[in-house]
Image: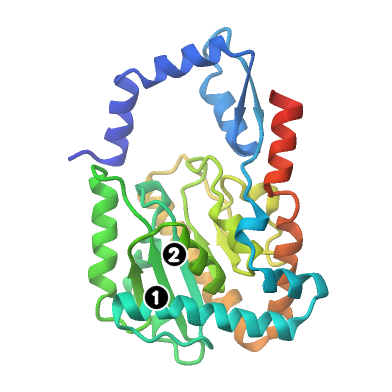
């Protein structure tokens, strides 16, 4: 059994660094997958000579494949009524999956938070559970009810991530408004992005090279609540198109980072997201449409392909 830090040391000692340095020396130009990733990468390799230039080409997603057509129509016409009707339909599709897998009946009228991606330690799927007493208050709030879904897969030998997954399964088993879904492939991913109100993204800053799930979630009206890592610094307008954690010192011990970030997450949900969703629906809808406005076209595959062609190839 290796901790996340020990595993990273094993990867470095096993020769991955030498392999990467060789590749960077052979290439005339290399690319990172977000602007922050380029900054971090340049700092990682600054002590090596003859390293190729590292430029940022931020990852993106295919709008035509991922965005629901009715959501697109509602967004283009700024038709709030059509959007709400379609979002309720998409929630019911997702909640049929929840019912099938967990025998729990979720409510389309309740704000629904989704955390869904590959399970890895640095992504912190269990950040919401860092303070159990505060989390229990959150999920039992009758004035501002919530439903939370986790989905994703750990690598077979990533035992730390497997432990997190199992912990969430056992904790949520007897909670009527919590669910962990299996079979995280494209079909389930589409349901989660269409049926969620909040797309939760919790990596430790500088660990997420880009991340793309939040892009397709935003295309379907799911508002990002995220640390300011990966692609987010290029997209985020806190309180206007998403909600971003206050940045902290990423050189702090991981336990301290988790404590600060979890406290900030509870604050965002308790004091911003939930009151706005239930008490200020017009303001909430504006954030939803702003999110779609700002993710398109900057984070679509058309921009990505054009940038690769012009700047790298």
**Is the residue under label 2 in contact with that under label 1 (CB below 8 Å)?**
yes
Secondary structure beneath dot 2 equals helix
Residue 262 appears in the picture as rendered: yes
| Mark 2 Cα-neighbour bin, 10 Å: few <14, some 14–19, many ≥20 | some
Residue shown at the point (46%, 75%) measured from the top left: 94
Rendered image quadrant of residue 262: bottom left
The spot of residue 183 in percent (x, y) is 34, 61
What is the residue that sits farthest to the right in this orientation? 77
Q: In the image, residue 98 lies at what x, y percent?
A: 38, 77
Q: Earlier in the sequence, mark 1 or mark 2?
A: 1
Q: How many marks?
A: 2
Q: In the image, 233: left or right of 149? A: right
| Depth check, front residue: 194 or 134 | 194
Residue 276 in sight from this viewpoint: no
Please give the residue where the numbered disc 2 appears in the rendered image.
Answer: 188
Locate residue 188 relative to residue 133 in the image: left or right. right
Residue ranking furthest to the top:
50
Q: For residue 97, which numbered disc appears in the image?
A: 1
Q: For this rendering, which residue is in front, 54 or 207? A: 54
């Amino acid at each position: 059994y290796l901790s996340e830090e020990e595993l990273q040391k094993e990867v470095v000692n096993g020769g991955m660094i030498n392999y990467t340095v060789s590749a960077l020396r052979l290439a005339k130009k290399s690319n990172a997958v977000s602007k922050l990733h380029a900054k971090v990468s340049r700092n990682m390799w600054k002590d090596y000579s003859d390293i190729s230039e590292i430029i940022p080409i931020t990852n993106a997603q295919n709008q035509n494949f991922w965005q629901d057509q009715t959501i697109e129509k509602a967004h283009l016409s700024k038709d709030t009524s059509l959007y709400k009707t379609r979002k309720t339909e998409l929630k019911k599709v997702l909640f049929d999956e929840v019912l099938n897998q967990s025998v729990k009946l979720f409510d389309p009228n309740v704000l629904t938070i989704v955390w869904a991606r590959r399970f890895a330690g640095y992504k912190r799927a269990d950040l919401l559970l860092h303070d159990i007493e505060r989390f229990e208050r959150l999920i039992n709030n009758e004035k501002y009810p919530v439903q939370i879904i986790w989905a994703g897969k750990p690598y077979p030998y990533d035992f730390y991530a497997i432990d997190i997954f199992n912990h969430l399964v056992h904790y949520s088993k007897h909670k009527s408004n919590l669910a962990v879904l299996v079979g995280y492939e494209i079909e389930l991913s589409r349901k989660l992005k269409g049926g969620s109100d909040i797309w939760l993204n919790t990596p430790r800053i500088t660990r997420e090279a880009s991340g793309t799930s939040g892009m397709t979630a935003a295309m379907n009206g799911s508002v990002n609540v995220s640390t300011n890592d990966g692609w987010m610094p290029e997209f985020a307008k806190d309180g206007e198109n998403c909600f971003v954690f206050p940045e902290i010192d990423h050189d702090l011990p991981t336990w301290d980072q988790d404590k600060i970030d979890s406290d900030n997450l509870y604050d965002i949900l308790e004091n911003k997201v939930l009151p706005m969703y239930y008490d200020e629906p017009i303001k909430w809808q504006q954030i939803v449409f702003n999110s779609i406005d700002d993710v398109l076209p900057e984070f679509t595959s058309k921009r990505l392909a054009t940038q690769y062609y012009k700047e790298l190839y």
